[in-house]
Image: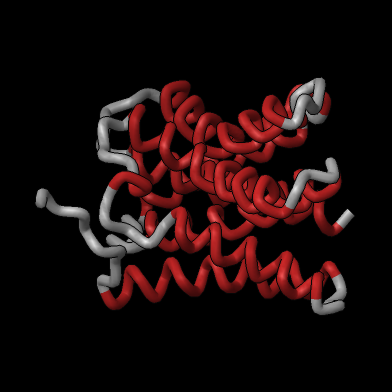
Amino acid sequence: MLFYYLDLAGVAVFAASGVLAARDRDLDVIGIIVVAAITAIGGGTLRDLLLDRHPIFWITDPWYLIVITAAALLTVAYVRVRPPPGATLLVADALGLGLFALSGAQLAEAAQAPALIVVLLGTMTGVTGGVLRDVITARVPLILQQEIYATAAIVGVAAYLGLQALGTPKAIAFGVGMAVVVALRLIAIRWGLHLPVVRKF
């Protein structure tokens, strides 16, 4: 049950990040909710399709769409009263990345996927919604920039699997893995860290 509530929390955070990304794109309320929904459930939808999990998680549970709509409308109301600081989108995105990467890893693990596939699917679950959000709002996706983004998800999921291999309880490994993702992302934002750029040679 805790995993379910964490998943809903991740959906709410990513929905909010979708609203923040779309707030200067002159969209109507429906457009805002659409961007929020794509951001929130895009990664999980791709994960379920690749794992052949049918029906897709949000089709059988309306609470996902309810949470997305509520989070989107509350975020719209909030930013109309008090504009968020410039880094709010990046922080919200970091939290959503951590929650979704680890939740995706858990589902891949439950499907008895090999460790490498668990890392891959966890990372895809975390980054896909943000990629779709950025494409729809006409931004260069963070994953294609010099950002420690997908790398943070990879390291966090790897830490989750490594801790379990050492005998750490799954719940603790989940929490540590998620903290690693969020910490790496926020540290990279704070200090301007990025991966080396491949230049022409």
Observer-nearest of 78 and 157: 157
Q: Position of residue 114 (x, y in %)?
A: 75, 48
Q: Position of residue 68 (x, y in %)?
A: 61, 37
Number of marks in the image? Answer: 0
On screen, residue 86 above or below 11: below
On screen, residue 81 above or below 85: above
Q: Is residue 189 left or right of residue 38?
A: left
Quadrant position of residue 98: bottom right
Q: Position of residue 18 (x, y in %)?
A: 44, 40
Quadrant position of residue 130: top left
Observer-nearest of 169 and 25: 169
* Residue positioned 81% across, 22% down in the render: 54
Q: Position of residue 44 (x, y in %)?
A: 65, 36
* Residue positioned 59% across, 66% down in the render: 156
Colouring scheme applied when the structure was drawn: secondary structure
Q: Quadrant of the N terminus?
A: bottom right
On screen, residue 131 above or below 105: above
On screen, residue 155 above or below 127: below
Q: Is residue 78 left or right of residue 134?
A: right
Observer-nearest of 201 and 65: 201
* Residue positioned 54% across, 54% down in the render: 97
* Residue positioned 78% across, 44% down in the render: 113
Give the residue at the far front of this rendering. Answer: 201
